[in-house]
Image (cartoon, rainbow, N blue to C red):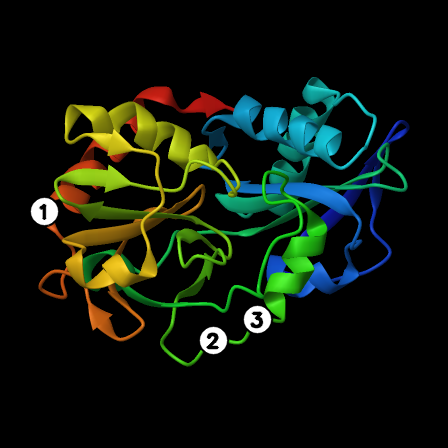
Amino acid sequence: MSPTLIKILTPNGLQLADYTANSLADAVKYEPHDGIYTLTNTFNHGQVLKMDAHLDRLEDSGRRVGMAFKLDRPAIRKALRQMLDESGYGDVRFRITIPQAEPDRITLSIEPFSGHPAETYINGIRCITLKPSVTRVNPAAKTTGWMHDRDAVATPPGIFSGILLDETGDLLEGTSNNFYAIIDGELRTAGSGVLAGIAQQIIFEVAPNILPVNRTAVNVRDIPRFSEAFLSGSSRGIVPLVEIDGIMIGDGKPGAITKQLREAYAVWLNEHLEDL
């Protein structure tokens, strides 16, 4: 059996997809270039975090690219539960993809998921900035076009993610995550020109209890002044960032404030899990 279970949710129920894939990443090549998607994971064998926020963003992304549809949320949840039971995978990471041409045929893809390597959080990650020519056409929408485009962005070995810049050198976001820097005692992150993240919603809720939040992008020339930095994403949570473009952030280890934010994020997460 393929490690990735892929089905199409239609008005007549679930149907098997006409292709197979070894992973969600492998399945990207079969998914449409014109469409929208969201991706997240389960906890505790069937619980989810901010599921409605993911579906809200799907509908918002659809409006932003001119797609007219209304999600049948109970049907999506029921179909995902059915696929979880059928797969026997335990916890999974799943993607919901809606093609622009046929918005009533929703692709649901799931793969086993046991979290990310502990060393990612213990040691932190390295990133590079990308040329301003690497850009998202519609950054406020989570589109499948960008999902395909970012796969063509090459990064050197050992680099976790590229970070998108605008033409003035402001750091916007990672290729599949939100970016944050701690500088001059503030948490800074771009407030426009980026995709509003679901994990980011949680960070904006817990961070003000730890330090001021300023939704203004930092510039590439400020990197040597960062005391800490991190990325966030739905399936990753908060990921410490210790180097950008070969420049060490702080002392080159995950910082104390990032650790505080990770702890606060984990508490919030455990208090707000819900059944799929």
- Mark 1 and mark 2: span between their CA atoms? 28 Å
What residue sits 21% from the left and 31% below the top? 264
Where residue 218 appears, as percent x and y from the top left, is 31, 49
- Mark 3 and mark 2: span between their CA atoms? 7 Å
Label 2 neighbourhood size at 10 Å, few (<14), some (14-19), many (20+)?
A: some
What residue sits 31% from the left and 23% below the top? 205
The reply to whether the C-beta atoms of the residues labelled 1 and 3 are less than 8 Å apart is no
Label 1 neighbourhood size at 10 Å, few (<14), some (14-19), many (20+)?
A: few
Question: Which one is earlier in the sequence, the residue at label 1 or at label 3?
Answer: 3
Element at badge 1?
A: helix
Where residue 146 appears, as percent x and y from the top left, is 65, 55
**For residue 93, which numbered disc appears in the image?**
none
The reply to whether the C-beta atoms of the residues labelled 3 and 2 are less than 8 Å apart is yes
Q: Is residue 1 visible?
A: no
> In the shown orientation, is residue 57 left or right of residue 27?
left
**For residue 256, which numbered disc appears in the image?**
1
Where residue 195 appears, as percent x and y from the top left, is 53, 41
123 lies above or below 207: below
Query: Which one is closest to the eye, mark 1 or mark 3?
Result: 3
The reply to whether the C-beta atoms of the residues labelled 1 and 2 are less than 8 Å apart is no
Element at badge 2?
A: loop
Q: Closer to the camera, 87 or 17?
A: 17
Q: Which residue is mark 2?
A: 155
Name the residue type under label 1.
Ala
Q: Which residue is mark 3?
A: 153
Question: Which one is earlier in the sequence, the residue at label 1 or at label 2?
Answer: 2
What residue sits 90% from the left and 42% below the top? 101
Q: Closer to the camera, 176 or 43?
A: 176
> In the shown orientation, is residue 21 left or right of residue 111?
right
Name the residue type under label 3.
Val
